[in-house]
Image (cartoon, rainbow, N blue to C red):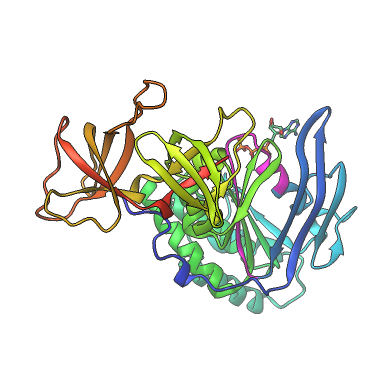
Amino acid sequence: MTSPTSSASARRPDRSAARALIECRDVQKYYADYHALRGIDLTIREGEFFSLLGPSGCGKTTLLRTIAGFEDISSGVVLIDGQDMAGVPANRRPTNMVFQSYAIFPHLTVAENVGFGLRRDPRPAAEKAAAVEEALGMVGLKGYGNRASHALSGGQRQRVALARALILKPKVLLLDEPMSALDRKMREQMQVELIKLQRQVGITFVLVTHDQEEALVMSDRIAVMFEGQIAQLDGPEALYARPASRRVANFIGVMNFLPARILDETENGVMVDAPGLGVVEIPSRNISSADPGDEGPSIGFRPEAVSLLGPNVAAQNRVTGGVIDEVVYYGDMTYYDVRLDGSASFDGKSRPVRIAMRNVFGREVQDVGTRTRVSWSPGSLILFR
Ligand SMILES: Nc1ncnc2c1ncn2[C@@H]1O[C@H](COP(=O)(O)OP(=O)(O)OP(=O)(O)O)[C@@H](O)[C@H]1O
């Protein structure tokens, strides 16, 4: 398992100056008295691969459907390409949606499915057939036009659904969990293909997913949603490295948390005391907010931000001793739960921390009960206060 954000930034074009294509301003949505969207403010830029990420029921599909025009909003404004969408029906919006369930017609051929949206297009049949072939080429189904749709695999069906949406050349493609019915291998393959396709066609993609890895892999920016609100809107690296709250940190990957005592404000940040780590200065950029209900401030760090140090390796960073409590071997990685020395210093409760180590040839996996050294850098710690 690689860190899902590794080296992804280099591939991502900078769209911070691109113009706003979708703008939601204080969007509220009630289903009877259920408050499904609670003041959504966001801007999606032209050409962006944007994801709405959150647990089941957080309102991400509702938000996507309000952009598509399948759902009216209770108050607020949705603008697409500068135009207020109030009262504009779905079929008059410059958007097209690809659904989780593919929704292709089994009794039509692949080409008939893809060309379905062109049925009222006045162009001559030969031109429309060429457009169908072009759309099939985009999704890797060149030459599949005459196949029967019912005989396609799940991945192929999803490609047909994509081609059918793309042939209408929408400004925005809305994707509602389009890969959730595929198996893991197929899903990973489709993710890579979708990224390539999006770059090729340059259309703005808005993806709904509850899968944090999928969002990190694919998106330029991600809005993390909880209970009808956006908790954080950022690029994948920023979301992973500097989650705005403990809740976001817990939703995106694994994070260790230790209780912390704030000792002092300094010029560059805050001095804190954390069990097992001792006194450490947290730089201002690594300070996030606690969630309501958190029991006081805490220090968080990712399992790969700390490492086990071999006995003969000189330390570059700060070093703490500890004892290995649990070992989980994954082939490419090993997870160690380590009880840091002094980890029970606050309240007598010992809290093992999880450390992820890449397995390299020639380095043995350590046993439970082994004393070890743990290397960490203050720059990798986040204070939630
Ligand atoms: N038509 C509806 N009538 C009443 N309540 C609805 C309706 N559609 C959605 N809801 C409720 O609104 C909330 C948000 O639903 P939504 O489908 O947007 O969530 P989601 O984040 O997309 O979740 P999931 O991943 O499970 O689809 C849920 O509590 C859901 O039960």
Task: Please name whichever residue, 78 or 255, is drawn nearer the observer in this view of the structure.
Answer: 255
Most extreme residue toward the top, as rendered?
348
Image location of residue 2, percent across then percent down: 33, 54
Image location of residue 155, percent across then percent down: 45, 53
Q: Quadrant of the C terminus?
A: top right
Residue 219 is at least partly visible in this image: yes
The picture quadrant for ligand 1 comes to top right
Most extreme residue toward the right, as rendered?
87
Q: Residue at x 51, y 70 (%)?
A: 12
Task: Please name whichever residue, 383 or 163, is drawn nearer the observer in this view of the structure.
Answer: 383
Image location of residue 42, percent across then percent down: 73, 55
Vertical placement of residue 331 versus 57, above or below: below
Q: Residue at x 56, y 27 (%)?
A: 295
Question: Is 232 contained in the magenta span?
Answer: no
Vertical placement of residue 213 versus 120, above or below: above
Residue 142 is at least partly visible in this image: no
Vertical placement of residue 252 versus 143, above or below: above
Total of numbered circles in the picture? 0
Image location of residue 138, percent across then percent down: 52, 71
Region rendered in magenta: 47-63
Q: Residue at x 58, y 73 (%)?
A: 14
Q: Residue at x 36, y 27 (%)?
A: 345
Q: Is residue 274 left or right of residue 67?
A: left
Most extreme residue toward the left, as rendered?
362
Q: Tell me which corner region of the image, top left, top right, bottom left or bottom right, holds residue 317.
A: bottom left
